[in-house]
Amino acid sequence: MNASPSESLRVAVIGYGLAGSVFHAPLISSTPGLEVSGIVTSNESRRAMARRDFPGASLFSGAGEIWRDPSRFDLVVVATSNRSHVPLGLAAIQAGLPVVIDKPIAVTVEDARRLITAARDHAVPLTVFQNRRWDGDFLTLRSIIDRDLLGPIVRYESRFERYRPAPKANAWRESADPEDGGGLLMDLGSHLIDGALVLFGRPLDVYAEVGAYRPGAVVDDDTFVALRFAGGVHAHLWMNTVVRTLGPRFHVSGLRGTYSKYGLDPQEPALKDGMRPGEPGWGLEPQTSWGSLSTTVDGLHVDGAVETLPGAYEHFYTQLRDSLRLDEPLPVLPSESLATLQVIEAARESAREHRVVSLPPNAMGS
């Protein structure tokens, strides 16, 4: 760590597309004790955006300029396409710089293990941006489960659905090249699976259906993953771009109650509109978007809307700041992201071979 305790940690953001410009840089700049000190992008229009958004930050056309003098920074954020996560993450680790990698941590389990091993060997903090853990509805669901308002959970359903009838041209997420890590299972599945594992731990087995249905689609655009957990919990996860009438974001049933929630967390559109954490209304949903809870508490039936807790993507960076400054736990352990990637690979195997794939007890996070 190069900064003194009284100084802000200097952050270099590599990539200034959607992830860098909409999520990471605004959240970093909104976090006391962190500042955007460098931005890496070779795209001229994005350089102009970065210069406008952060006039005090140094602009670099390539990440190599950071590695030549890493003492200028205290943290690196890799907000680039999936195929570059591992080489950039390894370069940051070898330069001795703590690193955030946008999800997924890597495209393969093998590469994720390379990153984790390198971070351990160099004693460099490594974490992964799983921002959906701080969606307001997910925070609300965790609170409901923690308070045991549903009783023992039986069925957990979670969805990310949208309607995009045609693949985006020249988009790496629509690429069939395995090194690009395209498709919904890798993209939205990284969020959905991570959420299920946060709530229920290691799944026993995985079943998946993975399809590409839109004309011209070469990667999955309609995927279903089923996870079975110890204790009887069954998780069903949907991710697709071919649905015009959307299902519930969450539908979770226990032996005493059910929580159901429609609609998406408002933080991403708020960030796109220029809103920032700390401003009035940040992370809040209108009452019309609240979920519903039907349960029995102390013998009394409860049935009605449940206020959604405020979303808080900024908590990822406040926790990371405290981890680097105060040796607090990282916001997301790299082993947790490895576990998600192991489930993704098992889901691909299941879909390919049309069978349930069991996960050995020592497979997750190792």
Image (cartoon, grey):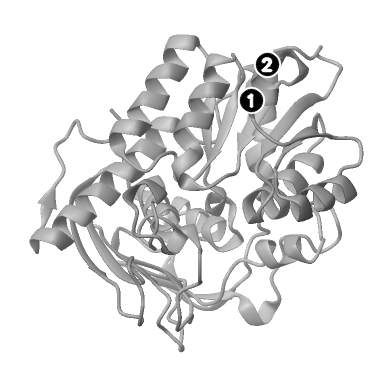
- From the viewer's perspective, is 291 left or right of 67? left
**Tally of marks:** 2
- From the viewer's perspective, is 355 left or right of 34? left
Amino acid type of disc 1? Gly
Which sits in the foreground, 247 or 148? 247
At label 1, counting other C-alpha atoms closer than 10 Å, the crowd grade (few under 14, some 14-19, many 20 or more) is some
Amino acid type of disc 2? Arg
Please provide percent x and percent y for residue 70: 69, 16
Q: Residue at x 47, y 57 (%)?
A: 172
At label 2, counting other C-alpha atoms closer than 10 Å, the crowd grade (few under 14, some 14-19, many 20 or more) is few
**Labelled pair 1, 2 in contact (Cβ < 8 Å):** yes
For label 2, the SS is: loop
Image quadrant in which the C terminus is located = top left
Image quadrant in which the N terminus is located = top right
Which sits in the foreground, 171 or 184? 171
Q: What is the CA distance from the residue labelled 1 to the residue labelled 2? A: 6 Å
Q: Which residue is mark 1?
A: 64
Q: Which residue is mark 2?
A: 68
Please provide percent x and percent y for residue 277: 79, 52
**Quadrant assignment, res 40:** top right
Residue 166 - label? none
Residue 26 lies, with reference to residue 32, above or below; the image says below
Q: Residue at x 55, y 55 (%)?
A: 139
**Is residue 231 at all visible to an observer of this figure?**
no
- From the viewer's perspective, is 110 left or right of 332? left
Residue 48 lies, with reference to residue 275, above or below; the image says above
Q: Residue at x 47, y 46 (%)?
A: 82
